[in-house]
Image (cartoon, rainbow, N blue to C red):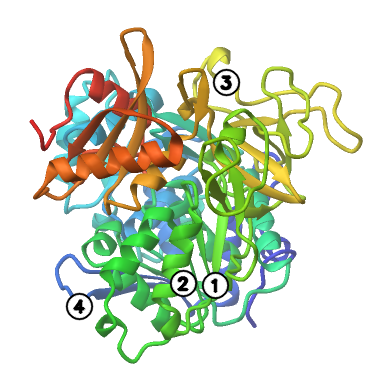
Amino acid sequence: MTPRQGSTLTQLTTASTTTGTPSILSILHGRASLRPDDIGFTFTDYERDPDGVRHSLTWSQLARRTRAVAAELRRHGGTGDRALILAPQGLDYILAFLGSMQAGLVAVPLPLPHRGSGHDRVAAVLADTEPAVVLTTSAVVADVRDFVDSAGSAHPPTVVEIDALDLDAADSAADSAAEPAELPSLAYLQYSSGSTRVPTGVMVSHRNLTVNFDQLMRSFFAGTPLPAETTLVSWLPFYHDMGLVLGVCAPILCGHRAELMSPVAFLERPARWVRALAQNPRAWSSAPNFAFDLAARKTSDDDLAGLDLGGVLGIISGAERVEPATLHRFVDRFAHFNFADHMMRPSYGLAEATVFVAASIWDENAPAAHFDSAELGAGRVRPCPPGRGAAAGTVTKLVRYDVPESPSLRIVDGDTGQECLADQVGEIWVHGENVADGYWRKPPAEQSGFGATLSDPSPGTAAGPWLRTGDLGFVHAGGLFIVGRIKDVLIIRGRNYYPEDIETTVQTLVAGRVAAISVPVQGTEELVAVVELKKPDDLDAIRSEVTAVIANAHGLSVADLVPVPAGSIPTTTSGKIRRAACVELYRRREFDRWDG
């Protein structure tokens, strides 16, 4: 018998949180009881062998080892204490995450600290959470201990090596010690670097997680069971919201096997991900927009020799604005391996809503959604045919999403709190039990995105609380369209421009990342384009082409084109461009420019 999602989650639960909510842990132990010998997770390690070494855990092994980790952690912390996870991607990371929650601690998944921004980010989280314990592995424990010691905490946390524990000991006393009377409602803190270096922890509850998973399943599968052979394939980092939910939580919640690898394994050879999609039955996966372009460019026909992508169930494209051109290139590249457009699932979400808000099915035959860019900049929606827009601007191509029933979504005038009419650009607001309670230890002044109230809500619409996403969008012809981040809008000579539009234009000429920012020059805002390039042979020609295409498409002059090596543009953990950080680097003249 294969347990199914949806109502089956209730049948599998044996314990609850302080709010009476079933938890991912009770569902895990239900899986272990019903299907003890079925494989739950497989992680392929490419670090020591380029062909990969596979490591697997059955549901019973996962449940038993989760309890063993929890028994150890309860020796070092109590219910509600924080447990930081600083470990390489792998099965030990998953055990650290689940074991922390099993012990009643609040899990804090993080990347391994590195010099530079990553080190600063983790150090800030360490100070913010004041953890009782830090979970790592023996391979990196020396570096982690040095990092924790250098933080100089008044109450330094205990460092625990997950792989050094006897995780398969049959110890009933350990089992009982691992079970708090009740789990706290707070499951984990999802830290996001956002567009600045200051990390913020979203407080995700057990209820948020299970509700959002049900919302996701209803949106993608209309509440019907997944095919029995479905495999969840992921390379996304576990410390990122999409990677954590797809790679760790979803396999447990839906009861289907996960095939995992590390982000480094994907970046070293993107074909590994595409091959995994073909080699695993009914593969379901997820990736940010940039990964589809990378996989299409770096995967050869020889990499897929003898393989077929026709069985792929779907791939979520999310974490950053989804570009129609990217979807088309990916579908077109792999069409002769039987990859079809309906397998692409553009999605929109954010950590403050756990992860998921809205989605759609990509259809190459549907009319493209083209809108006049100048009108969008003025807050109005005017569809237009391909080519130049009606107001000397360019055409913005946007992906259409289905407006979700759950969670509730409205387009709102952020200044008045009133709902916008159709075909008006406004801020996207979200309401539902998937919305987190707020940011960890932030004062009320920094919680303004949560608990918003609508003024004079329409019939059937709740007055509050609403989550202000900070994203701009609109509803047109019954569909939802995402325009961009409010704080990233460029205001140049009194007109609004969306940086994603300018960046997309430049990427018709260059393959690397592009950041469009505005900087003050002699009292007025001017456009600066930061462009990642391999060492250019003719920089003057590139500068001429880029400035010309921006002028022709957007009617804008470029005050400065900043050519930089690949990897120079700062990004968030999900690959989003940190434009505010780009402005600071430019202001301080800290970009390493090819032109000196």
Q: Are marks 2 and 3 in contact (CB under 8 Å)?
A: no
Q: Which residue sits at x=83%, y=33%?
A: 462
Question: Reading the chain from its start, which is encountered first: label 4 or label 1?
Answer: 4
Residue 574 seen by the camera: no
Q: Is residue 230 above or below residue 569?
A: below
Q: Is residue 491 above or below residue 166?
A: above
Q: Residues within 10 Å of mark 4 (few under 14, many from 20)?
A: few
Question: Reading the chain from its start, which is encountered first: label 2 or label 3?
Answer: 2
Label 1 element class: helix
Q: Which residue sits at x=22%, y=24%?
A: 151
User: Residue 489: percent from the left, percent from the top?
Assistant: 49, 28
Q: Residues within 10 Å of mark 3 (few under 14, many from 20)?
A: some
Three-letter amino acid code at disc 4?
Asp
Q: Are marks 1 and 3 in contact (CB under 8 Å)?
A: no
Point out which mark residue 341 bears. Answer: 1
Question: Reading the chain from its start, which is encountered first: label 2 or label 1?
Answer: 2
Q: CA distance from mark 2 to mark 1?
A: 6 Å
Q: Is residue 232 above or below residue 376?
A: below
Query: Mark 3 — residue?
Result: 447
Label 2 element class: helix
Classify the position of the N terminus by image quarter.
bottom right
Q: Are marks 2 and 1 in contact (CB under 8 Å)?
A: yes
User: Residue 134: percent from the left, percent from the top?
Assistant: 31, 39
Residue 521 seen by the camera: yes
User: Residue 452: percent from the left, percent from the top?
Assistant: 70, 24
Label 3 element class: loop
Label 4 element class: loop
Q: CA distance from mark 2 to mark 4?
A: 27 Å
Query: Mark 4 — residue?
Result: 51
Q: Are marks 4 and 1 in contact (CB under 8 Å)?
A: no
